Image (cartoon, grey):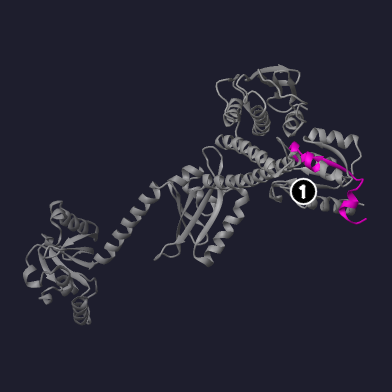
Amino acid sequence: MLASFRYEEQIVDRSPGKAAAEDSDLFRHIVESATDFAVFAVDASGSVVAWNVGAERLTGYCEPEILGQTGDLIFTPEDRAAGAPERERSTAARSGRSEDERWHQRKDGSRFWGSGLMMPLRSGDGFVKIMRDRTAQRLKELELSESEGRFRMLATSIPQLVFRSAGDGTRTWGSPQWEIYAGLSDAKSRGFGWLDAIHPDDQAMTRDKWRQAQQSGEYYAEHRVRRHADGEYRWHQTRAKPIDGTAGEWVGTSADIHEMRTLQDRQQVLLSELQHRTRNLLSLVQAIARQTVRSSTSLSEFSGHFESRLAALSRVQGVLARTDHGSIKLEQIVRAELEAHGADERVEVGGPDVELAPNAAQALALALHELATNAVKYGALRQHSGTLSVKWDLRENDRGRLVKLDWREAGVSLPPGPPPRKGYGRELIERALPYQLDAVTKFEIAADGVRCSVELPLGGMAT
Amino acid sequence: MNRPADILNGARLLIVEDEYLLAQEMADYFENLGTEIVGPVGTVARALDLIASSRIQVAVLDVNLRDERVYPVAEALKQIPFVFASGYGSELEPDVYADAPRCIKPIEFAALARTLGEQIKSSE
């Protein structure tokens, strides 16, 4: 039937000549064998007048059934309703050609993406259309754009800064988060413009890592990125990998790890501080042991004294640990020591709120321990007639602010004989507190019990 | 005359240590070796006073004194040899003191005496 369509006269602009017949034949062969192309012709109203094998393959309509029917059948119903076939013909008539890419519909209702070109017949009473099936390519494009859409959605909704670049680190795209965080527009960030937001000390390393990434196939760097909002350089961890199936495109993220880095640094300092405190504490224990050895006449006396001193040290360490080595209330220290020695309502305790530095709290606690131990052995905490008051107040003199603490025992009948020799407890009060805390101390054994006063400078040390 | 105990006999040792009991222990130990003790003191200011007013041949310096570090004392000692006593390793020291001799707390007095003796010897 194709023979009824005179290609040589209708489509091809050629001069009539002796080779015309062969040309016509050749041309028919081409059209018939071009099975990958749908080639068909319609008259001015759109009725099909010619239909090749390629058209049959693509649309499912065979030549006999479509001839005389409207060629608009291969448009989708919605495009037909919208007048797409008429527009195609009028464009072709007006400008000599009409290119068209759209979804078409086969005889069985399934759809294909047709990419075609329509041209008017020279006779002016119809059109020829050549069309290719590009469904596969179209689907791939759609898939890509869908995955591109998903990528952008993800890239723009996560807190990390996302970028795309070539394998050498030259950037092709930065997410909006990046633009906001770094204060660099996408345009300014392209190439190596993004390096402007990296800390000057980290730039060389950052670029160097891109060179390494080309060997290892993976980018990893920790560097400081300037936060535009406040100008702070914050530690980021940046990773990137090449994307499969692309021509060397990489995609990467930068995550803010500043808090983590800061915590790690702090942990390092704390560990070393802990080590230091532990060793200092061991030194102190060692010194207490030596002192106790010196003042003990037997092993059992040593072990009793040593254990009770260690217990006092551990009590004050416990209080310190609970306050995370911040300041400690004087009252806490006093009460802890008295309670450990079974003090009851006969003991009066009181004074204003006073905060002590850790070293002052520890030294004072050890001294109070000696006073309390002594009171239990010989004084107010042993005898029913005895009373004890531990009071303090704040005052100010030429040495600055200080707290004066008074330990007063009363109603105690001292054992006959000479007062006990100056021991470790008195040494702590009379010598250690002045040495360590610049305290002024007084210790006396009055007729009815021990009196001790400690003036402790607060807030910095006196010289 | 090469044993540390001999070298320290009659030497003048500055002790800077803020913990009274430790300072006292140390002073007792070295006095038994015949060392003359300068101090002990527990603050930078007092140590600087002693350096300005006393003859000192060697010093032991506790690194952490209450709320201050002992480094100004180390600096004021100039050519006088010293040994740090510290609960820290060297990792927190300023670089200039990274190689300074040190004894880690708790201090073994015999080891401290050896180190002090070596310092005196090498400074002679």
* Occupied quadrant, residue A94: bottom left
**Quarter of the image containing the N terminus of chain A?**
bottom left
SS label for mark 1: helix
Q: Confirm whether residue B18 shows in the render.
A: no
Asked if residue A91 is positioned above or below residue A181 in the image, the reply reads below
Image point (80%, 52%), residue name? B110
Q: Which residues are magenta?
A: B1-26
Asked if residue A175 is positioned above or below residue A332 in the image, the reply reads below
Is B72 included in the stretch rendered in magenta?
Answer: no
Judge from the rendering whether residue A279 lies leftward or rightward of residue A336; answer left or right.
right
Q: Confirm whether residue B73 shows in the render.
A: yes
Image point (52%, 47%), residue name? A260
Q: In x, y percent, where is residue A13?
A: 24, 70
Dot 1 falls on which chain? B
Judge from the rendering whether residue A98 lies leftward or rightward of residue A372; answer left or right.
left
* Occupied quadrant, residue A120: bottom left
10 Å crowding of disc 1: few (<14), some (14-19), many (20+): some
Q: In x, y percent, where is residue A29?
A: 20, 80
Q: What residue is disc 1 on?
A: B97
Nearer the observer, A326 or A379: A379
Nearer the observer, A65 or A192: A192
Nearer the observer, A139 or A229: A229
Q: Amino acid at mark 1?
A: Tyr
**Quarter of the image containing the C terminus of chain A?**
top right
Image point (52%, 61%), residue name? A168
Q: In x, y percent, where is residue A348?
A: 59, 19
Judge from the rendering whether residue A235 lies leftward or rightward of residue A77; answer left or right.
right
* Occupied quadrant, residue A450: top right
Q: In x, y percent, where is residue A436?
A: 74, 32
- In this rendering, the count of numbered labels is 1
